[in-house]
Amino acid sequence: MHMLVFVIHSEIVFRYGMSDIYRFDSEREAFAWMYDFVDDSCIDNGRFAWADDPKEVEKYHKQADNGCCGFFDTEVVIKGRKALIGCNYGH
């Protein structure tokens, strides 16, 4: 298997087939990356949850279910801890 390495906002992205793991040092960096990646003037319903916290994950999914139009959801790693991050866009 070949590994492609990209640099985005000084972060390294490891691509294995179809899955990407984006690594950041803070939630703030992850949100900044997400807004740049989605690149839409109408972004709202930003959401975040630590993947190992069932209550946060449940709240995250409820918030995602209340969004409209387009959506973006992915997993990232922040200081070694997996998290969910997402938003809605394109109103």
Image: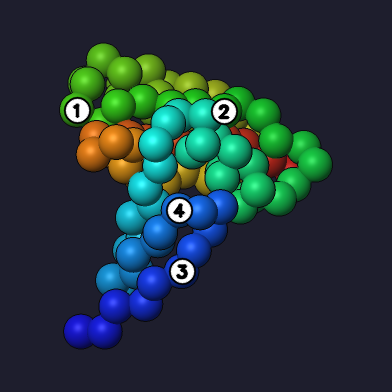
Residue wearing tag 3:
6
Q: Are marks 1 and 2 in contact (CB under 8 Å)?
A: no
- Residues at discs 3 and 4 in contact (Cβ within 8 Å): no
Q: Percent position (x, y) of residue 87?
A: 57, 35
SS state under label 2: strand
Q: Nearer the viewer, mark 1 or mark 4?
A: 4
SS assignment at label 3: strand
43 and 65: which is toward the camera: 43
According to the image, label 4 marks what residue? 11
Label 1 residue SS: loop
Instruction: In the rendered view, tell whether residue 60 sits above or below residue 4.
Output: above
Name the residue rendered at 56%, 52% in the picture: 9
Amino acid type, callout 2: Gly
Residue 15 appears in the figure: yes
Nearer to us of marks 3 and 2 is: 3
Quadrant of the image for the N terminus?
A: bottom left
- What is the tally of numbered marks visible in this picture? 4
Amino acid beneath label 4? Glu
Which circle's residue, 3 or 1, is located before the other in the chain? 3
Q: Which residue is mark 2?
A: 46
Residue 66 in picture, x, y percent from top left:
54, 24
Q: Earlier in the sequence, mark 1 or mark 4?
A: 4
**Distance of label 1 from label 4 (alpha carbons):** 23 Å
Q: Position of residue 64 (x, y in %)?
A: 49, 30
Which circle marks residue 52 in the picture?
1
Q: Looking at the image, what colour scheme do you see?
A: rainbow
Q: Secondary structure at mark 4?
A: strand
Alpha-carbon span between mark 4 and mark 2: 21 Å
Q: Quote the CA–CA distance across marks 3 and 2.
A: 25 Å
The residue located at (23%, 39%) in the rendering is 80
Label 4 or label 2, whichever comes before in sequence order: 4
Q: Amino acid at mark 1?
A: Asp
